Amino acid sequence: MPISADQIRNLHKYEIRILVALERLMRRYRWVPLDLIKKTLGLSESEIAYRLGRLIDMGMVRFDTVPYEGYALVFGGYDTLALISLTRKGVVSALGCPIGEGKESVVYEALGLGPVALKFHHVGQRSFQSVRVTREYMPDEGHCPWIFASRFSAEREYEALTRLHPKTSVPLPIAINRHVVVMEFIRGANLNRCRLEDPPGILDQILEEVRSAYRAEVIHADLSEYNVMIDEGRVYLIDWPQWVEVGHPNAEDLLARDLENITRYFQRKYQLEITVEEAIRRVTR
C-alpha cells in the first residue's frame, strides 16, 4: 500500500506508540502477542484492539494466527515511523509521489531544505534468503525480520554514499532513519531510458566514476544500465547497498561483472567496440 501523508498526519498518539512498541518487540518476537503489547503500553484491551484494527486497515500492521496469534509491523508502519522521525528532525517537510521502484526499494520525491529523494529499502520475503547469503552486512543466523534487514541495507548504502561523495559522482547523502536514506534529488533519467547523443563520452564518464570509487577502495557490485543516471550529460552512480571493499575475496569477480554489464550494454545499444578487459584496465590502472 502506498504511503499516505494524510494517514500519517492523522495518526492518534496511541497508534504511534503501538508502532514503536511493535518495532522494539519484534527484535525478540516474529509475531508479538496481544498480552505483551498491553503490558508494554498499559492501555486497555479495547483501546489497543481498536487502534490495532485501524493500523491493520491502513496497511501498517499485520495480524496472523500461525504459529500463534500475534501482530507484526509491516513496511507501511515502518515507513511511517521513519517519516515521523525525519519530519520531527526537520529533514523532511512534505512527501511527494513515488518516482522509482526496484526489487528491494521504492523512491519518493520530497521536500526538505529543497527537493530531496527518499529511498525506502524494502527487502522482501522472496529476496530475503538470497540477501542473507550474499550480503556481508546480514547476520549469518538468528532472528532478523525483513524490516530490520531493510535497515541494514539502508545503513550500508548510506555508508557508501558518505564514503564516496563528493569525489565520486553519487547523490549527496543527507540523512538516514531506520530503512530510509534521504539524499540529493537527481532530476535525470536512468541510463536504460536515455538515448545518448555522445555514447563514447558517457561511457568514459561511467568508467571514470567506477575508477574513482575503486580508488576509494569501493566496488559497486550491482552495476548495470539500471543503476546509472544521466542528468544534463552528467553521470551519477546510484543504488549502493551491495557494495564491497576492494579487499573483499570476490572483489575482482564483482568488478568484472559490473564492467561486463556496462560494456555489454554499450556494445548492444550503441555498437561501441570496447571489451570488458579494456574496461577493467582503465578502472584499475
Image (cartoon, helix red, strand yellow):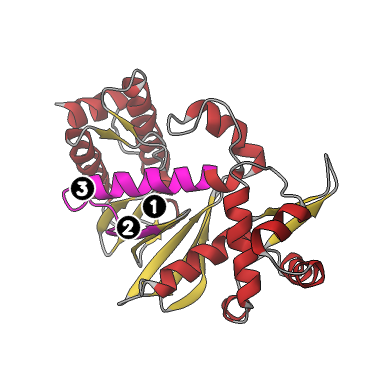
Q: Nearer the viewer, mark 1 or mark 3?
A: 3
Judge from the rendering whether residue 74 lies leftward or rightward of residue 53; answer left or right: left
In the image, residue 80 lies in the stretch drawn in magenta: no
Range shown magenta: 149-176
The residue lying at 22 percent from left, 34 percent from top is 214
The C terminus sits in image quarter: top left
- Find residue 281 and report its horizontal and vertical position in percent: 20, 25
Q: Residues within 10 Å of mark 3 (few under 14, many from 20)?
A: many
- Identified by mark 1, the residue type is Leu
- Identified by mark 3, the residue type is Thr
Q: Nearer the viewer, residue 137 or 202?
A: 137
Can you identify the residue that label 1 sits on? 191
Q: How far, Cα to Cα, is label 1 from label 3?
A: 17 Å
The residue lying at 22 percent from left, 32 percent from top is 217
Q: Are marks 1 and 2 in contact (CB under 8 Å)?
A: yes
Q: Earlier in the sequence, mark 1 or mark 3?
A: 3
In the image, residue 158 lies in the stretch drawn in magenta: yes
Under tag 2, what secondary structure?
strand
Judge from the rendering whether residue 273 lies leftward or rightward of residue 98; answer left or right: left
Can you identify the residue that label 3 sits on? 168
Under tag 3, what secondary structure?
loop
Note whether residue 240 is visible: no
- Identified by mark 2, the residue type is Ile
Q: How far, Cα to Cα, is label 1 from label 2?
A: 6 Å
The residue lying at 36 percent from left, 38 percent from top is 262
- Find residue 231 and report its horizontal and vertical position in percent: 30, 62
Q: Nearer the viewer, mark 2 or mark 3?
A: 3
Tag on residue 230?
2
Instruction: Give residue 123's quadrant in the image.
Output: top right
Q: Is residue 114 above or below residue 41?
A: below
